[in-house]
Image (spheres, grey):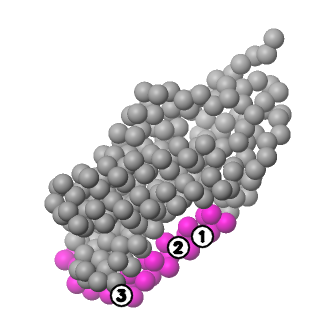
Amino acid sequence: MTTIEEVTIGAFSQPLVGMSFIISVLGSWVGLTCANRARRLGSGSSSWLWLFGAATSIGGGAIWSMHFIGMLAFDSHVAYALDVGTTLISLAVAIVAAMVGMLIATAMRGNAGYIVGGLVTGAGVGAMHYTGMYAMQMSAKMVWKPTVVVISIIIALAASALALFFAFNITTRLMRVGASIIMGIGVCVMHYTGMLALEIHSSAEDKLGHVSGADPVYLAMPIFAISAGMLIVIGFATMFAGINDDLDDP
C-alpha cells in the first residue's frame, strides 16, 4: 500500500525568503521612483515611458521576481521542473496588470482610480501567482485549499490598491523608503499566503520520479541576473533624469 505524505507550511529556506523580500522592496523603490517621475512630467510620451518603467519594476521586479524566488524557497520534498513558456506568461501578466492599473489610476484620479486600478492589478497579481504555480511540473499531486486561495486574492487586491495610492502620492525619499517596505511586506504576505494554500500529496515513488521541464535552480540564475540588471538600469535612469533633485526631503 502506498503511503501518502502531505507537505504544507514550514518547508521554506529562510535565506531565500529574506532574499525574496529584499528584491520586492528594491523593485518597489525603483517603481515608485519611476511613478514619481511620470507624475511630475504630466502627459506626453516621456510620462508613458516612466509609467512603463514603474510597471516593469513593480510588476516584473517587486512582484514576479519575488514570486519566483519565493517558489525556490519552498521545499516540496519532491523533484519538480518548470514549464518555461508558462513561467514567461506569468511574467507578462504581472507587468501588464501593473501597467493597466497605473493607467486606470492616472485616468480616473482619486480614490476611485486607486480602487478600480487596484482591482485590476490585484486580479492580475493573483493570476500571475497561480499561473506561476501551474508552471510547476511534478509527479506528485498538488491540492489547493479554496479558502486560503480566496484570502490570498483578497490580500493581492488590497496590496495593489495601496501600491497605486503610494505610486501617485509619495513625494519624498523618506516616504518612498517606508512605502517600499510596506509594499514588500504586502507582496510577500500575498505570495506566502498563496503557498499556504498548497498541499503536495506524494509517495516514495514520486520523490524519485522524473519530470520534464527546466530545472528551477538553473532557470533562477538568468532570471535573477535579468531582474537585477533591469532594476539597476531603471534605477540609474531615474537618477540621471534628475528625479531626486527637487524632492522635499534632502
Q: What amino acid does circle 1 point to?
A: Ile
Q: What whole-number distance in Å separates the C-alpha atoms at marks 1 and 3?
A: 22 Å
Instruction: Tell me the magenta residue range.
Output: 222-250
| Mark 3 element type | loop
| Mark 2 element type | helix
Q: Is residue 27 above or below residue 78?
A: below
Q: What residue is pinned by disc 3?
A: 241
- On the question of residue 36 being in view, the answer is yes
Q: What amino acid does circle 2 point to?
A: Met
Q: Is residue 150 above or below residue 85?
A: above
| Residue placed most toward the observer, 172 or 126 | 126
Q: What amino acid does circle 3 point to?
A: Ala
Q: Is residue 185 left or right of residue 145?
A: left
Residue 57 numbered tag: none
Quadrant hosting residue 41: bottom left
Q: What whole-number distance in Å separates the C-alpha atoms at marks 1 and 2?
A: 6 Å
Residue 226 numbered tag: 1
How packed mark 2 is, by other alpha carbons closer than 10 Å (few <14, some 14-19, many 20 or more), is some
Q: Is residue 193 left or right of residue 15?
A: left
Are the two marked residues, 1 and 2, in contact with CB atoms closer than 8 angstroms? yes
Residue 230 numbered tag: 2
Q: Is residue 199 left or right of residue 34?
A: right
Q: Is residue 168 above or below residue 94?
A: below
Name the residue at 22% across, 71% down: 171
Q: Earlier in the sequence, mark 2 or mark 3?
A: 2
How packed mark 1 is, by other alpha carbons closer than 10 Å (few <14, some 14-19, many 20 or more), is some
Q: What whole-number distance in Å separates the C-alpha atoms at marks 2 and 3?
A: 16 Å
